[in-house]
Image (cartoon, grey):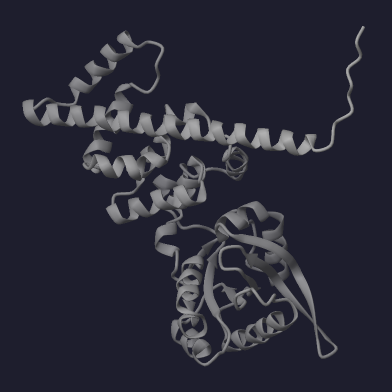
Amino acid sequence: MTKLNLSQPAGYEDLLQQIQNHIRHSQTAAILAVNRELVLLYWQIGRLILQRQQQHGWGAKVIDRLATDLHREFPELKGFSSRNLKYMRAFAETYPEEQFVQQVVAQIPWGHNVRILESVKNSIERQWYIDQTIQQGWSRSILTHQIASGLFHRQGQAQTNFDRTLPKVQSALAQQVLKDPYTFDFLNLTEQAQERDLERALLNHLREFLLELGVGFALVGSQYHLEVAGEDFYLDLLFYHLRLRCFVVIDLKMTEFQPEFSGKLNFYLSAVDDLLKHPDDQPSVGIILCQSKNKTLVEYALRDLSKPIGVSTYQLITALPVQLQGSLPTVEQLEAELAAVASGTMNEYHE
């Protein structure tokens, strides 16, 4: 009997890794190609239904009949229910230009498109959620959560002095990274909680915290120690932002904003730039997260500071309409979706 030689030749692991990467890339490309064709097919079907209804004055019952006949002809295919055909019609009515569907909308799965159609009525807002889904790889549950939390209206709304303290390109990007307010509805804290309680809770729910902060934040440490002139200082949360290419210091406050908060953070940023910043890094950015703020006080506090600082508020409980509360994914669902972002399934496309 011939024995297998289990020893690996030099360079074998590298070869195996490269082949596996090529296979995964090919699988992803195939799934994306199938999705584009599927979304375009659904748009074409929706356009045909819309055109015939407009030409002949047909009502909604014709869609029910179409669903029955299509199921009889293609019993093995999913996705042609009466409900989905109505989504196709609404899809074609919402996006009348085929080129836009091909180049933009077809880049996200059909299930994502349905969520946006159902929940977002403004065309600018719709395109923003499509673009963010493409750029950040949101799953359906995460997309649903971001829409329900009003992310479009919170993004870029923090008060900052970035326009005076950062180069123009860096300033615009940094401004868009910050939100106001941040939503920490995954935490269970009482009104008596202190800053350390908030910090501990955020770290215990780091996955959800990073999701709310947005793509690009990498945690460096909590209560990060700095020594300046022989004295010890501790940063609540220190991050590095991969797109901004800079350190981000977050100072947590369980009170209303006070002007002295900005001076302290300005000092922290100077220390971080001197002690941690690499020569190729951009200037470090600071974020003060507080329960509430007076905009005039924030404006005066930031006006003459030399370091880039933003001030945002946070909400521990999201004030959503009752009809939307039941549609939000649970923490468990978010975790499951985050784990499945890269894998994708055809069931999602054929919902």
Left or right: residue 183 compared with residue 52? right
Asked whether 199 or 351 is in front, the reply is: 351
Q: Tell me the residue at 70%/59% (across/down).
A: 203
- In x, y percent, where is residue 57? 8, 27
- Image quarter where the C terminus lies is top left
The single residue placed furthest to the top in the displayed view is 1
- In x, y percent, where is residue 137? 51, 46
Above or below residue 61? Residue 182 is below
Left or right: residue 61 compared with residue 111? left
Asked whether 168 or 329 is in front, the reply is: 168
Above or below residue 148? Residue 171 is below
Left or right: residue 57 compared with residue 269? left
The single residue placed furthest to the left in the displayed view is 56
> Is any part of residue 193 visible from this angle?
no
> Is any part of residue 319 visible from this angle?
yes
Q: Tell me the residue at 61%/35% (across/down).
A: 22
Q: Tell me the residue at 44%/86% (across/down).
A: 296
Asked which quadrant contains residue 226, the reply is bottom right
- In x, y percent, where is residue 128? 37, 55
- In x, y percent, where is residue 273? 68, 81
Q: Tell me the residue at 47%/31% (across/down).
A: 348
